[in-house]
Image (tube, rainbow, N blue to C red):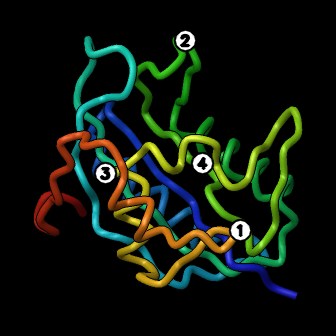
Amino acid sequence: MTTDAFIGLGSNLEEPAAQLARAVSELAALPGSTLVAQSAFYASRPVGPQDQPDFVNGAVWLQTELEPHQLLDQLQAIEQAHGRERLRHWGPRTLDLDLLLFGERILDDKRLTVPHRELPNRDFVLQPLLDLKPDLTLPDGTPVAALRHQCPDNRLRKLPPADYP
């Protein structure tokens, strides 16, 4: 049985748009998974410490046979392959992959919280999700579009396709 999984992508180091483009290809190649769609890429200022470059963000929609923690393991392996270092909370990174939504599942354990805890506060996550599926809702029925309408502005800028591979 497959589940719809929505994954957020972010980078602000070492050619961020290229990092995201490679990650999309790697996500499409995950075992038991099919890439349904990828969003446009967006630039935004960083959340947290402002002494770092702007971020490039996007999202993908996968249909996967993996269980949530198996998918998380795969996401973290891709991050590591991109040289991800966790030196500072909300600090700069080569690649950040977040499991945002996993079907209608609600999870909250030591390793994984789904829906992602910060989802309502991140326009750079909500807008790419709406690109993928405009009528997307959270497991509790909340429309993502309603969250986007109420979300704080993070100076989100859609990148033209020519700006990323």
- Residue at (46% x, 82% y) in the render: 133
Residue beneath disc 3: 18
Rendered position, 159 above or below 72: below
Q: Is tag 2's residue or tag 1's residue first in the polypeptide sequence?
A: 2
Q: Residues within 10 Å of mark 1 (few under 14, many from 20)?
A: few
Residue beneath disc 2: 87
Q: Quadrant of residue 30?
A: bottom right
Rendered position, 97 above or below 36: above
Specify the amino acid type for callout 4. Answer: Asp
Between disc 4 and disc 1, the foreground one is 1
Residue 103 pos. (x, y %)? 74, 74
Q: Is tag 3's residue or tag 1's residue first in the polypeptide sequence?
A: 3
Q: Residues within 10 Å of mark 2 (few under 14, many from 20)?
A: few
Specify the amino acid type for callout 3. Answer: Ala
The number of discs equals 4
Q: Residues within 10 Å of mark 4 (few under 14, many from 20)?
A: many
- Residue nearest the viewer, comparing 94 with 62: 62
- Residue at (73% x, 67% y) in the render: 102
Verify CB contact (< 8 Å) between mark 4 and mark 1. Answer: no
Q: Is tag 4's residue or tag 1's residue first in the polypeptide sequence?
A: 4
Tag on residue 98? 4
Verify CB contact (< 8 Å) between mark 2 and mark 1. Answer: no
